[in-house]
Amino acid sequence: MIVVGGGVVGLLTGLQLGRSGLSVELFDSGCLGRESSWAGGGIVSPLYPWRYSPAVTALAHWSQDFYPKLGEQLLAQTQVDPEVYATGLYWLDLDDDVQALEWARFEGRPLLEVAMADVQRAVPALAAGFGRAVHMADVANVRNPRLIKALRAALLQMPNVTLHEHCAVTGFIREGERIAGVQTSQGEMRADQVVLAAGAWSGELMKTLGLELPVEPVKGQMILYKCAADFLPAIVLAKGRYAIPRCDGHVLVGSTLEHAGFDKTPTEDALESLKASAVELLPALANAEVVGHWAGLRPGSPEGIPFIGPVPGHEGLWLNCGHYRNGLVLAPASCQLLADLMLGRELIVNPAPYAPAGRLG
């Protein structure tokens, strides 16, 4: 079994398959998890869950319920804490708060309208001037670099899993209708099954088979402040920008949405825009130091619905990619679904919306 891609989706795929007793060879062109998985904010929720299709909602709900258990399992196994930190999330001055509340009632999610006076008491650092708020108390965020570190450590403990870092997959070995392995920068590697989980680069690899996978890079930039540990007790989101607290007082502010190909160079324009949004949300950040500024490439896909399942006409090739802005929140459910499909087990959700069949060019 080969897994192409060492982001959170590839690593969790390897963990699922490895725990099922399969021999797994996992390849990444660089260091594990240093692309989109490292760059994201780690909110364990879509930013605006009511604006997504039921396909995204189904995976998100399963993953949200599973994340605390995943964090506990990884900590116990590796002594690395991914810091699944339940802070809740306040959405401020939404244009579609009525639809959001209707969605929550239909889905049975704890999203409630709250008075701004209560928000100000709960988040004293929040700027004045916001008029309306809705709140979901159980939204968590995960410290994504630590999640990657924990997953890597867990995989290294497994004798049936081999990690190949700095080993780029450049194409596939095709024998008739079968995919029999991959071409890498270090030579051929053969396997009965290949899972493509290469994030924003998945579309480029599919082109080597003459297939058009509509997954493209979408650049996102973030900044990081170091504040007092109690400065921001909850995630706050307004006008498409958010601030996320970590356990130790770091606060992430993001993010941009840019179509710039595979260029992930941080820019001064984005830095100034993010700093302005930060101060608009939390005025005290005007006097705080930006201790980090980076960019990552999200795997953009139509409606943000990932591709999970077998590729028609290419026996042995499976996809788990195209999660767009929701890779971290959808990863546990996506990888569970893929493993269950591959191993013929009972499925956690209907796989039809994610099937590559009919969605490739």
Image (cartoon, helix red, strand yellow):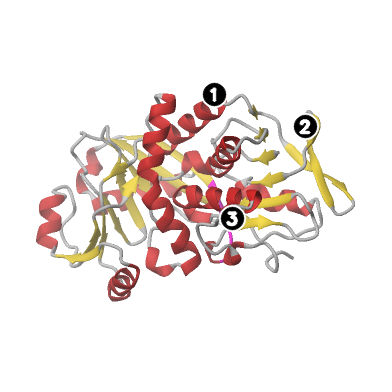
Label 3 sits on residue: 322
Label 2 sits on residue: 185
Amino acid of disc 3:
Gly
Rendered residue at 69%/53% (across/down)? 203
Q: Nearer the viewer, residue 158 or 80?
A: 158
Bounds of the magenta segment: 297-302
User: Distance of mark 2 from mark 3, alpha carbons?
Assistant: 24 Å
Assess whether residue 103 is covered by the magenta stretch: no
Image position, residue 356 (x, y; %): 67, 62
Name above or below for residue 312 compared with residue 64.
Answer: below
Q: Nearer the viewer, residue 186 or 253?
A: 186
Assess whether residue 298 is covered by the magenta stretch: yes
Helix, strand or loop under label 3 = loop
Label 1 sits on residue: 157
Helix, strand or loop under label 1 = loop
User: Distance of mark 3 from mark 1, alpha carbons?
Assistant: 29 Å
Name above or below for residue 1 compared with residue 157.
Answer: below
In the rendered image, which quarter is residue 143 located in? top left
Where's the C terminus, which quadrant?
Answer: bottom right
User: Distance of mark 1 from mark 2, alpha carbons?
Assistant: 25 Å
Which residue lies most toward the right here? Answer: 176
